[in-house]
Amino acid sequence: MVKHTKKVRIMGKYGTRYGASLRKMVKKIEISQQAKYTCFFCGKTKRKRRPASISAFVSLMNKLIKYF
């Protein structure tokens, strides 16, 4: 079985299931979930999105915990 996901990229795992419009909506959400974000405190781009819109940058959080 050949897997080509050039056009659909991250949504290739769903194949032809669920319909094109639903896959396009989910594609937008999944790309934003897996993207790297810029940390507002130190400016690094290694911050990742956590569930329920809570973002955490692990090394930054460890540094902040030491100060408080």
Image (cartoon, helix red, strand yellow):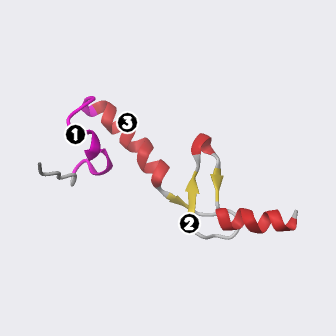
Spatial distance from mark 1 to mark 3, Cα to Cα?
15 Å
Category of crowding for the residue at label 1, using alpha-carbon neighbours closer than 10 angstroms: few (below 14), some (14–19), many (at least 20):
few
Q: CA distance from mark 1 to mark 2?
A: 30 Å
Instruction: Name the residue rendered at 68%, 70% in the picture.
Output: 42
Sequence-earlier tag: 1 or 3: 1
Is residue 27 shown above or below 58?
above
Q: Residue at x 59, y 63 (%)?
A: 38
**Residue type marked 3:** Met
The region drawn magenta spans 7-20
15 w.r.t. 46: above or below: above
How far is the residue under mark 2 from the one under mark 3? 25 Å
Assign a secondary structure to mark 2. loop
Tag of residue 25: 3
At label 1, the amino acid type is Gly
Q: Pick the residue in front: 37 or 64.
A: 64
- Residue at the spot of label 1: 15
- Secondary structure at badge 3 equals helix
Residue 52 image offset from top left, x and y in percent: 61, 40
Question: Residue at 47% of width from left, 56% of height from top?
Answer: 35
Q: Kindly check if marks 1 and 2 are in contact, taking CB atoms under 8 A apart as contact.
A: no
Give percent across and percent down for residue 56.
65, 56
38 or 1, nearer to the observer: 1
- The correct choice, above or below, for 19 with respect to 54 in the image is above
Q: Is residue 57 magenta?
A: no
**Which of the two labelled residues, at mark 2 and mark 3, occupies the earlier sequence position?**
3
